[in-house]
Amino acid sequence: MYTMVMTIFIFIAIFLFGITLMRLGIKGLTYNQLEKINPDLSPVNGLILGIFLTLILQSSSASIALLITFLATAKLSLPFAICYLIGANIGTTFTAQLFVWNEVQLMFLCLFIGLVLIFIPKTKFMLTGCIMFGLGIVFSALNGFENLLHMIPAEKIETIANSPHNQPFSLATFGMFFTMVIQSSTVATGVLMSFSHGGSIPLIQVYYILIGANIGTCFTVYLVSLKQPYLARITAYAHIWINVIGGVVAFPIFIGQPMVTIAQWLSSIPEQQIVYLAVIYNVLTGILFLVFLKPFIKFLKFVYPK
């Protein structure tokens, strides 16, 4: 048992290293352009920019931290910031789609091309190599998780999946604390996708873990905002409220089960079902806050007066 737990943590560390390499490569290629962004501060542009930057940075926490540290100094409107947060929540689900395409051949191809490019003494080639090599490392970690799952007896997996402790609240709590520790909902989703290979984890259980993971990812953003100006801090608080209220609204089984059914209808592949489930959840939560944007802003200003 001890060996297996340590192996899981080693694969998580490898996964994080791969994501970090990808993020460094993408950030190096695009950072100068990102600093020059001076968007029209409308809510629609906030939503689009949130999705776009999260796709580039491969992390909602990183893109929201960028919003807080670099864009908070501008005359940033609160509606723009909130719509940016909604876009970031949606954008982070697309990263998980990369994990669905995980194949051993693709893993070796990314590792080989990335390694070759890293040693070319030109910045753009080296940064592109970091992206490719990082993606290969991520794929290798996911393959490691899947192989580890095959080492566990099927009866044991079934016992864990059907455990009476797997109640919605305990699953969401686990997802929240796990994401707070590793500071990445992307990694949490990737681990879930690996361990649900072949449908070993019921999708409804994955749904509640994802709700908790969305809340857990707020911790990193909150830490970044602690010594920032008022508008940056209230943006971080808005991020917490969006994920907590969204989780509470989506928590009842009569809301969660239809989402699970739709995801299962869209695909028969367990990993793809998790991606669809995350997209559906974040899109519906985003629509909820877009509809009630003005009351939500009034609530924030009331709870956190300047």
Image (cartoon, rainbow, N blue to C red):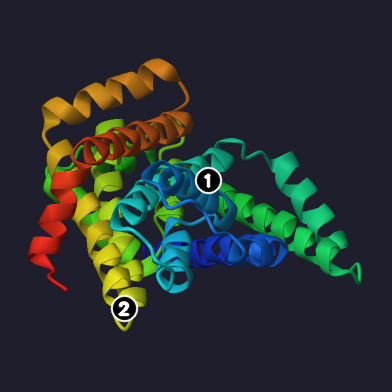
Q: Is residue 192 left or right of residue 260?
A: right
- Residue 115, horizontal then vertical, whole percent: 82, 62
Residue type at tag 1: Thr
Residue 229: mark in rendering = 2
Q: Is residue 96 left or right of residue 120?
A: left
Residue 277, horizontal then vertical, whole percent: 35, 32
Q: Nearer the viewer, residue 26 or 17?
A: 26
Apparent side of residue 265 relative to residue 13 in the rendered image (left or right): left
Could you tell me which residue is drawn at 47 percent across and 60 percent down? 63
Quarter holding the C terminus is bottom left
Q: Comparing marks 1 and 2, which lies closer to the viewer?
A: 2
Q: Residue at x 71, y 47 (%)?
A: 107
Residue 255 location, quadrant: top left
Label 1 crowd (10 A; few <14 / some 14-19 / many >=20): many
Q: From what the image shows, is residue 50 above or below residue 196?
A: below
Q: Say whether residue 117 is visible.
A: yes
Is 288 situated left or right of 6 in this image?
left
Would you name the residue on which mark 1 appears? 95
Q: Position of residue 101 (x, y in %)?
A: 61, 36
Find the residue positioned furthest to the bottom.
227
Residue type highlighted by circle 2 = Pro
Give the image quarter of residue 72: bottom left
Q: Label 2's element?
A: loop
